[in-house]
Image: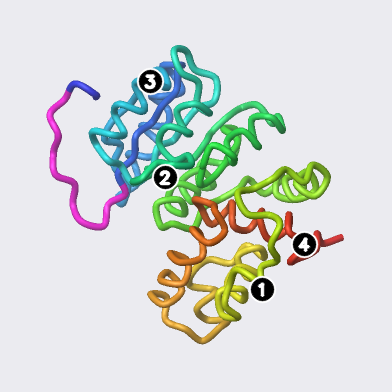
Amino acid sequence: MSGTPEVATPEGVVRVVVADDQALVRAGLEALLGAEPDIEVVGVAADGREAVDLARRLRPDVVCMDVRMPVLDGIGATRELAGPGVEDPVPVLVLTTFEIDDYLFGALEAGAAGFQLKDAEPEVLVRAVRSVAAGNGTLHDSLTKRVVSEVLARRRAQPVTAARGTDLLTARELDIVLLLAEGMSNDEIARELVLEVSTVKSHLARILPKLGVRSRLQAAVWAYQNRLVRLPD
């Protein structure tokens, strides 16, 4: 599809690039996502370099990125599209069959907005694409507690870790970060704090640069890392 002419996508439709080095997986994801009325696969790539080039040209709403790929792996490709210093990042949902911590943390540190296992139910993968496109991020349910536990164990330095959240954020911004750490969406945060969804989005736009992170998911991990919230039992 990378060689086909670009066609205008109807408003409200999520535009996706699929990157995977296995032809059958690419075809399966393209068929699965393309069957949804609100999702259009606008490009497919067989390696990380092709994925980066396609994403920069097509500016999709989400790139579904495999981890193990030739030429440039998925972590490196994610870093080029969404990592620190990227002025206009493209949201990346990392998909992998490997439930390996180094891949997971590599993806998060590279700027991924979400991480899902390929063996998740089809409806879970579709929801993950929609969630990332909407700016909500996503993490496979079976990995959430491990992510937080590992963050607390490693205490890896984020761009801002020495300062407490109260030194960086307003009271309202701190409220929003704490709700993010509970896994709430923008709509749920707005209901909880009796705000407009647009107001929540405006706050988030200010919060992420303050914390030195690129995604909602990274902001939630930052909250645990800085002990603003505690890992549930």
Q: Which residues are magenta?
A: 4-14
Magenta: main secondary structure equals loop
Label located before the other in sequence (1 or 3): 3
Which label is found at residue 166?
A: 1
Tell me whether circle 2 and circle 4 mark residues in contact (CB < 8 Å).
Answer: no
Residue type highlighted by circle 2 = Pro
Tell whether position 6 is magenta: yes
Is 48 on the left or on the right of 59, as rendered? right
- Rendered location of residue 197, percent (x, y): 42, 75
Give the distance between the C-alpha atoms of the residues marked 4 and 1, in whole angstroms: 12 Å
Give the distance between the C-alpha atoms of the residues marked 2 and 4, in whole angstroms: 27 Å
Residue type highlighted by circle 1 = Thr
Q: Residue at x 54, y 47 (%)?
A: 124
Between residue 158 and residue 183, name the one nearer to us: 158
Which label is found at residue 91?
A: 2
- Rendered location of residue 221, percent (x, y): 66, 53
- Rendered location of residue 162, percent (x, y): 71, 57
Label located before the other in sequence (4 or 3): 3
Q: Residues within 10 Å of mark 3 (few under 14, many from 20)?
A: many
Which label is found at residue 49?
A: 3
Between residue 37 and residue 163, name the one nearer to us: 163
Residue type highlighted by circle 3 = Arg
Give the distance between the C-alpha atoms of the residues marked 1 and 3, in whole angstroms: 41 Å
> In the rendered image, which residue does mark 4 sit on?
227
Secondary structure under the numbered disc 1 in the rendered image: helix
Q: Residues within 10 Å of mark 1 (few under 14, many from 20)?
A: few
Instruction: Write down the quadrant of residue 181 in the picture.
Output: bottom right
Tell me whether circle 1 and circle 3 mark residues in contact (CB < 8 Å).
Answer: no
Nearest-to-viewer mark from 1 and 3? 1
Tell me whether circle 4 and circle 1 mark residues in contact (CB < 8 Å).
Answer: no
State the quadrant of the N terminus.
top left
Is 117 on the left or on the right of 14, as rendered? right
